[in-house]
Image: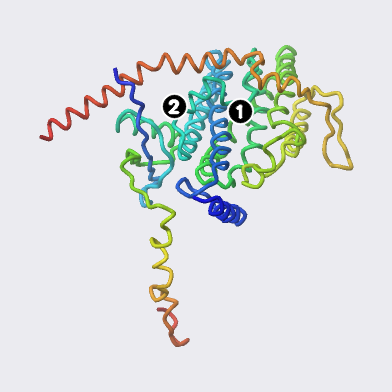
Amino acid sequence: MSEEQIKSLEKQFEARIARDEKIEPKDWMPEKYRKTHIRQMSQHAHSEIVGMLPEGNWITRAPSLRRKVALLAKVQDEAGHGLYLYSATETLGISREEMYEQLHTGKAKYSSIFNYPTITWADMGAIGWLVDGAAIINQVPLCNTSYGPYARAMIRVCKEESFHQRQGYEIMIKLANGTPEQKEMAQDALNRWWWPSLMMLGPTDAESIHTEQSMKWKLKRKSNDDLRQQFIDQTVPQAELIGLTIPDPDLKWNEERKSYDFGAIDWDEFWQVVKGHGPMNKVRMKARVDAWENGKWVRDAAMAHAEKKQERKEKQAV
Amino acid sequence: MSTKNWPLWEVFVRSKNGLEHRHCGSLHAADEDMALENARDVYTRRSEGVSIWVVESKHITASNPENNGEMFEPAQDKVYRHPTFYDLPDEVKHM
């Protein structure tokens, strides 16, 4: 194709998106659109899969059967969400194995929040309440994104995720109304997860390199800073309601803006964790690589069994 | 030892009797039995289905959007296939 032809196709393509038309897998698309979507969607899928690890840590130690079935169902949903997103990403022409390879070699990223440890049961509450809360704010606008398979996967994810946040908040309510030790445990979890949750919504707009293009393709409908403000405004009253304190001395209601002002975020910490120096980066990656490598014989055996069955069927047919 | 990757399957779910099976996504599985089981776990965790079809993706032949013109445009100028093409006197109420 000549450069001129590509230019004209690109123009038509941008016009389709501007008209709110969806792009489907076999449609022509600019290489950059394909690459950006592979990057963002696979990163999203990886986050769901790695995101099972911090919570998986507590399934066997959940304090009651009610909490255990809920946590188990939540972690299972995350596996499901990872699978919807991987299969949606595959429609762009990358294989599942390539995506795993990119995750395992550190070429692909996943949400930095999962590189923090879950040291008490209250962390299950804080993750559901704050991390899933922030994730929902991030994900809801994606239900309208321009790439059809991604938008459809996100609709399913968002529908299923609303219980995740509620189960987390319920854990926090219970602890906050419990013994002084339990309340202290809840406050400690909030102290540790608050700032990473704010960082999870991404770098400030001034530093975010992908925002402009992503807005145009409807991969993003609101800027990181707007999403962060939305998250803070919705979460602060929820903390007050259960008697917990947001660990930010500069947090203050701004009557003029009808929003909360908040303190400076430690972006050095964020970039350190993104670059692999968070407290749990190595442990998380090792768990994923081990699961993949130790599962190889099972995958191979299943394939060998399927082939044998197929051969037997064909022989009988003769 | 085979190092072949599990093939890709497309999943179709009927949400209740009376409705058609609808495509809801895809997954990897070694064979059709595993594909059905995985489809149940991945796509019907909240009773979204009463029946599942799986078909290996390689068996699907799809039209090419680049040929959408010759493929679908011939239907566009055949307005006489729609009831509104035909003139009726106002007195005729139900037809």
Q: With A143 as the anchor, is B29 left or right in this view?
A: left
Front one among A37 and A127 = A37
Return the residue nearer the eye: A246 or A200: A200
Instruction: Report whether mark 2 lies on the same chain as mark 1.
Output: yes
Label 2, on which residue? A97
Query: Pointer 2 and pointer 1: residues touching (CB < 8 Å)?
Result: no
Q: CA distance from mark 2 to mark 1?
A: 33 Å
Q: Chain of mark 2?
A: A
Query: Dot 2 surroundings within 10 Å: few (below 14), some, or many (20 or more)?
Result: few
Give the position of the C terminus of chain B as an image quadrant: bottom left
* Total numbered badges shown on the rendered structure: 2
Give the residue type at disc 1.
Gln
Considering only vertical position in the picture, is A116 above or below A7? above
Check the picture and name the quadrant holding the N terminus of chain B. top left
Q: Residue furthest right?
A: A256
Query: What's the image's color scheme?
Result: rainbow
Tag 2: amino acid? Glu
Residue that label 1 marks: A167
- The quadrant holding residue A314 is top left
Q: Secondary structure at mark 1?
A: helix
Q: Quadrant of residue A18?
A: bottom right
Q: Position of residue A71 (x, y in %)?
A: 55, 23
Indicate the position of residue A31 as horizontal and vertical percent values: 54, 42
Is A183 situated left or right of A5 in this image? right
Mark 1 — on which chain does it sit? A
Q: Nearer the viewer, mark 2 or mark 1?
A: 2
Q: Residue at x 12, y 35 (%)?
A: A317
Residue A257 is labelled as: none
